[in-house]
Amino acid sequence: MTAQARLDEALPESQHRQSLPVTTLAAHGYIVGDVIGQGTFAIVKKAYWTKYNRTVAIKIMSKATNGGVVLQKCIPRELDVIRNLRHENIIHFYELIETTMRFYISMRYAENGSLLSLVRKEGKLPEPRVRRYYRQVVAALEYIHTAGFAHRDIKLENIVLDVNDQVKLIDFGFACRLRGENVDPSAVVKPHLSTTFCGSHAYASPELLQFKPYDPIQADIWASGVALYSLLFGRLPFSSERKTNVVLEKIGRGVRFPAEVTVTEEVQTLIKQIFVPVEKRITWPLLGRSLWFYIELEEESPGQDVQKSAPIGLDEPSDIKRRKIDNKA
Ligand SMILES: Nc1ncnc2c1ncn2[C@@H]1O[C@H](COP(=O)(O)OP(=O)(O)OP(=O)(O)O)[C@@H](O)[C@H]1O
Ligand SMILES: [Mg+2]
C-alpha cells in the first residue's frame, strides 16, 4: 500500500473530503506541491509557506498507520527530538500541526535530496567529498549523543543535502533518549542499553542482529560506518540479505574493500575500527578525532572525478530492508 493510501484509509469518505492534507495545510498558509519522499510511515511533500515566503518539506503521518504504532511510538520520539535538538547538521523544524487523524511536521527543505539518491545517480563518490559529508554526519551524531539521544535509523535515505551541499540528518522516528528520568546518577558511567530492535537490516550492528540489549550510541556509530562505506564504494559493506545468520557470518569474516577502488589507508583504518564487535568498536571522542579527518585530501571541483557505476544493494526501497522486530521502548 502506498503511503498516500495509508494516510487516506482511516478516514470515512465524508470526513476525508473535509480534512484532506492539502485542505489542512492550505488553512495554515501552505501551498502543497509534489511528493519528495515516501518512507515506511510517512509521505513527505514539498510546499510553499506563504507566511514566510519559503519552500519547506512537510512530513505527513497518519495517526492510524501500523495499528497506532506510529502514534504511540514514532511521533512522540520525533517530537521529542524536534523540541530538544538544534544543530547545523540536523534538519531545522518549523512547526507541528495536529489534526484528529494526522500530524504534519513542517521543516526546512533540503534541495539536493538524500545521499541515497545521490549514490544511485552518481555511483561511488570521490573520497574527499565523502569525507566532507561524513564529518558532518559525525558532528551531528556527536551532538545528538552528547545531548542524551540516539538516532537509531542512520542510513543514506535519512541523510539529506541542502542547496549548499551541507548535510542535514532527518527522520527521528526511531530516536530514543539515552536515559529516562529519575535514573540513578551512577548509571551515567554505564552505557544505556536499548531493547528496541529497529532500523534497517543492512545498517544493523552485529549485537543488534543478535537481539542482545545494545548500546544505541555504538549502534549509530556502526550504521554511520555502513553509510561511509556505501558512499565510498557504491555498495553495502556486508549484505542486504535478510537472513540474519548470513549477514552475521559475513560480518564475522571482517570488512573487505573492493580491489578496483583506491582509497587512503586512513579511511580503511577508520572503517576497520567501526566494523568490529562492540567491545572493540571506536568510541567518542576518538571517532571525532580520526586521523582521516585531518590528512591532506584534495577536494574535487564540481563535476570532476565522478565515476559512474551501478550501486550494488542500494537500489531497493528502504521498507524492504527495514526490520522492526520489537517495539518495546
Ligand atoms: N526536509 C527534507 N528535505 C528533502 N527531502 C526530505 C526531507 N525530509 C524527508 N525527505 C525525503 O523523504 C524521505 C522520507 O522521509 P522520512 O525519512 O522522514 O520518512 P519515514 O517514513 O520516517 O522514512 P523511513 O522509511 O526511514 O521510515 C527521505 O528519505 C527523503 O528522501
Ligand atoms: Mg526515513
Image: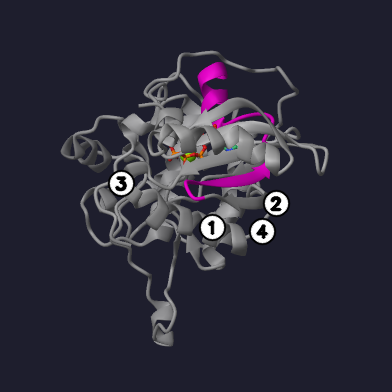
Please state which amino acid type lies under the numbered disc 1.
Leu
Please state which amino acid type lies under the numbered disc 2.
Glu
| Among the two numbered marks 3 and 4 on one chain, the one whose residue lies closer to the N terminus | 3
Please state which amino acid type lies under the numbered disc 4.
Arg
Rate crowding at label 1 as few (under 14), some (14 to 19) or many (20 or more) other CA atoms within 10 Å. some
For this orientation, the residue located farthest to the front is 14
Q: Nearer the viewer, residue 178 or 264?
A: 178
Cα–Cα gap, marks 3 and 4: 31 Å
Name the residue carrying label 3. 67
Helix, strand or loop at label 4? It is loop
Q: Residue at the location (43% across, 73% down)?
A: 179
Range of magenta residues = 100-125
Q: Is residue 52 left or right of residue 48?
A: right
Residue 91, position in %: x, y? 64, 47
Name the residue carrying label 1. 79
Cα–Cα gap, marks 1 and 3: 19 Å
Rate crowding at label 3 as few (under 14), some (14 to 19) or many (20 or more) other CA atoms within 10 Å. few
Cα–Cα gap, marks 1 and 2: 18 Å
Q: Residue 86, which numbered label? A: 4
Mark whose residue sits in front, 4 or 2:
4
Name the residue carrying label 2. 88
Cα–Cα gap, marks 2 and 3: 35 Å
Q: Does mark 4 have its CB less than 8 Å from ligand 1?
A: no
Helix, strand or loop at label 1? It is helix
| Among the two numbered marks 2 and 3 on one chain, the one whose residue lies closer to the N terminus | 3
